[in-house]
Image: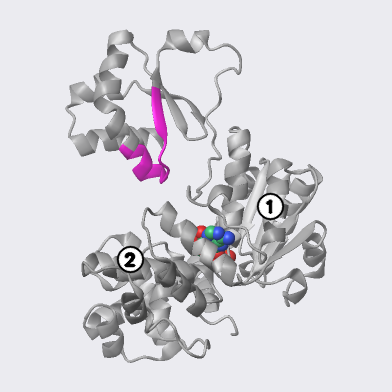
Amino acid sequence: KWKEILQRVRDEHELSEISFTTWIEPLTIHSVEDNLITILVPSEKMGLDYVSKKYTLPIKVAIAEITGVNYEIRFILPEEVKQEKAPAPVQKNLYVPNLNPKYTFDTFVVGSNNKFAHAASLAVAESPGEIYNPLFLYGGVGLGKTHLMHSIAHFILQKNPSSRILYVTSEEFTNEVIEAIRNSNNTAMTKFREKYRNIDVLLIDDVQFIIGKESTQEEFFHTFNTLHGANKQIILSSDRPPKDMDILEDRIRSRFEWGLLADIQSPDYETRIAILRKKQELDGYSVSDDVIEYIASNIKSNIRELEGALNKIIAYANLEKREINIDLAEQVLRDIISPNEKKVITPEFIIDTVADHFDITPSDIVGSKRSSKIVFPRQIAMYLCREMLDAPLTGIGKMMGDRDHTTVMHGIEKIEKEMSAKDSVRNTVDILKKKINPSK
Ligand code: ADP
Ligand code: MG
């Protein structure tokens, strides 16, 4: 990755070969701690001054683009390294996981709905592997499971930057198992096992998607036993408690129940208010109490939607240069607030779910960007509208930013082809279908 970062600095700033080889290429990572990357400049003092003056920002930007994390950077010289007594050159942590920097304990609002899950998470973060193992967090969609899991990981990393933490979604886990099995040479499997068994903390999000897949359950079972036997902390999340996971093998169910089960409920009114206040404060807005109360009294079950509503109001206010007040809130939220909370599956809902899953926005999906990061989700959304709603091709085209029906047909065929060729694509589609319609 470091190479890639340096290449990006070169490309973005169109550095000449000589500048690149003189200043950039020789840089190496000395250490990564919390949010600080220390970079070793092999030449003398002058080189350090120049590089830090000229390239600090480009390098920071490239790091943020490639890792998704905003690291601070610092340059040092070889002499300084020698002076730094003790902890022998901190090894580059190969396990810095993909964590959302915003999901920390500091930004998590504790309410009566999540008090227990929060306390359990904090206890595990303070003493990983020592008391509650595994920690099993469960609760409905958008109630803060992922936020708590990331908070635990951040907390552990902060106290001990070299701890080997792996955070994966069960989709990633499943796809890796599938890949390892499919490349039937032993090295793929060995690699997989090395990766998952030589760690200190394993977090698997949404384990409900692992169940029902025999080979994945098997591999999960062994991974679990190895780590648990070595007192390594395991943290799992799911949309329901183990006892309600129908097709779960009993031996795995009992493993889930070994440690601590902690549920998260829907937030009560006070908690919803507190979450909205915290959020506008973190985002640097000031929204009046009556608007916050309006949102909190109308959106009840899901914190993601609560935040979404606030974001939507702020976005409208900015776009239309209007003041944030009750009138605007009522107007903007009219279509979100439905009198009966029953969810009908609509194309919009499919698009939202797919976008959320791939961490892009709904407007990316209906927009015109053509990068593969967007095109693949877009085609999946087309496929799902066809498959789940039996919508006509022209209708789907209209929904997806006025595309014509041959484009839609092409997209759908492409996904069908990939599904028959790649287990991992089929797995992704399965997971999305379950997200869109859990009762199926
Ligand atoms: P889940 O994984 O349970 O579906 P997430 O952890 O993704 O839910 O939470 C959905 C959104 O709500 C996230 O943006 C998260 O930061 C926010 N959120 C959930 N619970 C809280 C809380 N107690 N305090 C602050 N934000 C929260
Ligand atoms: Mg989640």
Of 31 and 333, nearer the camera is: 333
The crowd level at tag 1 (other Cα within 10 Å; few <14, some 14-19, many 20+) is many
Q: Which residue lies at the image location 73% right of the left edge and 77% below the top edge?
A: 246
The residue that mark 2 highlights is 314
| Quadrant holding the C terminus | bottom right
Q: Which residues are magenta?
A: 61-74
Q: Percent position (x, y) of residue 28?
A: 40, 23
Residue type pointed to by label 1: Ser
User: Upstream in the sequence, badge 2 or badge 1?
Assistant: 1
Give the number of the disc on residue 263.
none
Q: Is residue 52 visible?
A: yes
**Residue 88, quarter of the rendered image:** top right
Q: How many numbered discs?
A: 2
Check residue 214 for magenta coloring: no
Give the number of the disc on residue 121.
1
Q: Which residue lies at the image location 25% right of the left edge and 70% below the top edge?
A: 367
Marks 2 and 1, how far apart in space?
32 Å
The crowd level at tag 2 (other Cα within 10 Å; few <14, some 14-19, many 20+) is many
Looking at the image, residue 257 lies above or below residue 433: above
**Residue 235, quarter of the rendered image:** bottom right
Looking at the image, residue 296 lies above or below residue 54: below
State left or right for residue 367 relative to residue 39: left
Q: Which residue lies at the image location 63% right of the left edge and 40% below the top edge?
A: 156
Q: Secondary structure at mark 1?
A: helix
Q: Percent position (x, y) of residue 305?
A: 47, 72
Residue type pointed to by label 2: Ile
